Amino acid sequence: MQQSKITTLIILAICSVFSSFSQTGIKGKVVDNNNSELLSNVIITNLSSKKEVLSNNNGLFEISKTGTYSFKKNGYLEKTVTIQNNDYLIIQLNINPSELNEIIIHSNLLPKKLKTSSATINILSKKDIARGNSINTTSILNRTPGVFMQSGALNTNRITIRGVGSRNLFGTAKIRAYFKDIPLTTGSGETTIEDFELASLSRIEITKGASSIFGAGLGGTIQLKPQNSYLNESPLNTEFTFGSFGLTKKLINFNYGNTKNSIKAIYSNTHSDGYRDNNEYSRQTFTLNSNYFLGEKDELSFLASYVDLKAFIPSSLNENTYLNNPTSAAFTWGQSKGFEDSKRGIFGLSWNHTYNNNVKQVTSIFTSFRKGYEPRPFNILDENTLALGIRSRFIGRLKLFNNNLNWTIGGELFKDNYKSGTFINLYQDFPEGHGSVKGNRLSDFKEKRKYSNIFFETNYALTNKTIVSIGLNFNHTSYNLDDRFIASIDNPDQSGTFKFKSIVSPKFGISHQLTNHIALYSNISHGFSPISLEETLLPDGQINTELKPETGWNYEIGSRGAIFNNKLQFSLAIYRLHIKNLLVARRTSQDQFIGINAGQTQHDGLELELNYIWLKNAAISLSTFINYSLNNYKFKTFIDGDDNFSGNDLTGVPSEVFNTGIDIDSKIGFYGNINFQHVGRMPITDDNNLYSDSYNLANLKFGYKVNANKNLKLNLFLGINNIFDENYASQILINASGFGGNAPRYYYPGNPANYYAGININYIF
């Protein structure tokens, strides 16, 4: 009996020893640091033994022992990690700006390499964002073919994609935008992205044409990807910038991360006196992004953004004032000291859960608010918006006839409550220079807006080189307006409900790999633009139930890839976008417009993007880029009352945009870039009797980076915008009308030659 016990103990001891050896394997996963996408086929090399393993389709890997390892994948910067224990690992890789075709995107929520996508997608990397002064989004977006952003001031902008949105007078509409998974587009279709702190973004993804996954917007979708917090790092980054027109910017960026959890907080304070009168701008932002890896299958992330903005509005000028006194504000705007005072916040919580190797779920809940106060010469607008929403989708893969089929299905529900009121502006009753004074109420509205999207998309590999994509979006949108102001003959009750017919938007695409580095693609997609409730209101207070949303089909063919040993990356797209039920804002008074369906437009265009690496070695790198957009946009049919504008050029869009630039970076720390932009002339009026002048801009930035010690890095920089002091209109107001015998105010003057300089300090604890 005693001998039996001893034998049992020996066996248990031997098993324990073997068990300890069997548990030495170290597991982990590799993710894209920008979008947390799981990265497959990452080469993981033990630098001592040279033994290699690969991450699987879910980014998972297992290594046998501790040591120093390199993690390498095309499209990403190689990372070296010293592993000292058996804890579960999460490895974050950053994209390589010189290999964008190889990076993993999920603009359609189906992860794949950019070069195999069947849609035209542009990636603006951290390098692209850093070319400018980190104050203004305009120069960044305008280097993207097919995208054009006009900027009358830091808070007065209009973005168009392939000409869509050009007829919106005072902001951006008819395109969709997201901050990670959180919609930035309101229930009425308006979008604002320029208030976000650029330092909080890791990259910007722009999809041209309608996307079945993101609401089937006519022009396309802009996705702002916030910079994820870093694991196992705790750097503190501060930056101070100053420049022309009283520009100052202070920024603090702090990150804390351990092996499983991380948090990043960014605060910025920006001020500018502005080039023009009544042009002062002050903005504070706070952005928080945190990630929590709960295990192999679950991840939580929290995102918050808050913006406090006060910006005065100089407005547009007539031609004579624009040419002879561009620093002045429009007379009435200067007298009333018109401004925009707004506070807005966005909060979102996302949960990623992996069910198995083939199915995962991503669910986000979010809320946002905006409180605005805007004195204008004709009235004072006081508004409040509160939005709630949820977005969820399943993502999976399976085998069909022995070929891979990737699929996603999900939905998005978004509701916002919008309260607005206008008041008499009594500025004329007070001494000059006093500014706006709030008087009696003129209107009081409460608007409930909601929309829902159900979407499906699948990618099927017909062969190893050919992928077919099919998508479908089902949208339902409705508005409810409660007019809470006392009705009278002059103020009829405008309460009512407006429901769109449900819209089904299909998409079909195909991509084919000609070689390992060159792909052809083509797609057909359907999209629409929602009508704002304000556009449905008629002067008698009734809702125009006959008004139809703009809808359109986008047809395109393109190619992307790399040649000459990957030194030249290129993309080329040729497209036709046909839009019907063209919505026209007909002015009925100085501050009132009504919407009418007036015809069709046809948008034919070509987009070209080239990036070439001339030199890249341990000492220096030299590269250049060229972007070109050729825009042939026409009113196919456009009849507005007695006016027939059919065949005319579409207003508010340049005939062409050309960008080129050179980037240089050296090992000793000096770096710089110079870029040139040509913008073709734009039709200002629908009858095409007036065009803006074409213009050329050149910008320069250079700096010096130095490692003061192991933990401290410094970056000094200086930039000059509009080097040759070009006079140009940075934004135009199409079809402006003159009132009271005054000339129409079409022009927003662009800034003359101006500079900025600063210092960035990075310390790693």
Image (cartoon, grey):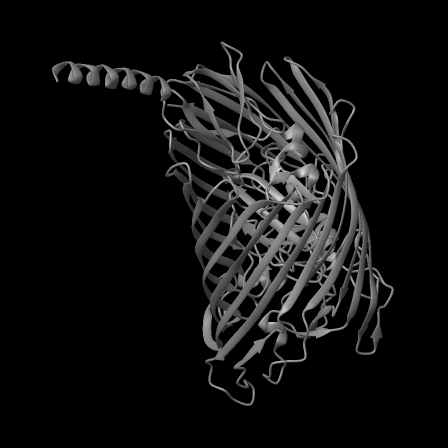
Residue 319 percent location from the top left of the image: 75, 58
Above or below, 83 against 482 in this view is above
Say whether residue 679 is visible. no
**Furthest residue toward right:** 647
Residue 614 percent location from the top left of the image: 75, 21
Residue 372 percent location from the top left of the image: 47, 61
> In this view of the protein, which residue sits in the foreground, 424 or 636?
636
**Furthest residue toward bottom:** 489
Above or below, 625 against 301 in this view is above
Residue 244 percent location from the top left of the image: 58, 38
> In this view of the protein, which residue sits in the foreground, 318 or 364?
364
> Toward which corner of the image does residue 543 lie, by quadrant?
bottom right
- Residue at (37% x, 20% y) in the render: 22
Task: Give the side of residue 675 with respect to residue 108, left or right.
Answer: right
Say whether residue 227 is visible. yes
- Residue at (55% x, 35% y) in the render: 57
Task: Give the side of residue 490 with respect to residue 674, left or right.
Answer: left
Q: Quadrant of the C terminus?
A: top left
**Furthest residue toward top:** 48
Task: Give the side of residue 408 with respect to residue 513, left or right.
Answer: left
**Furthest residue toward left:** 2
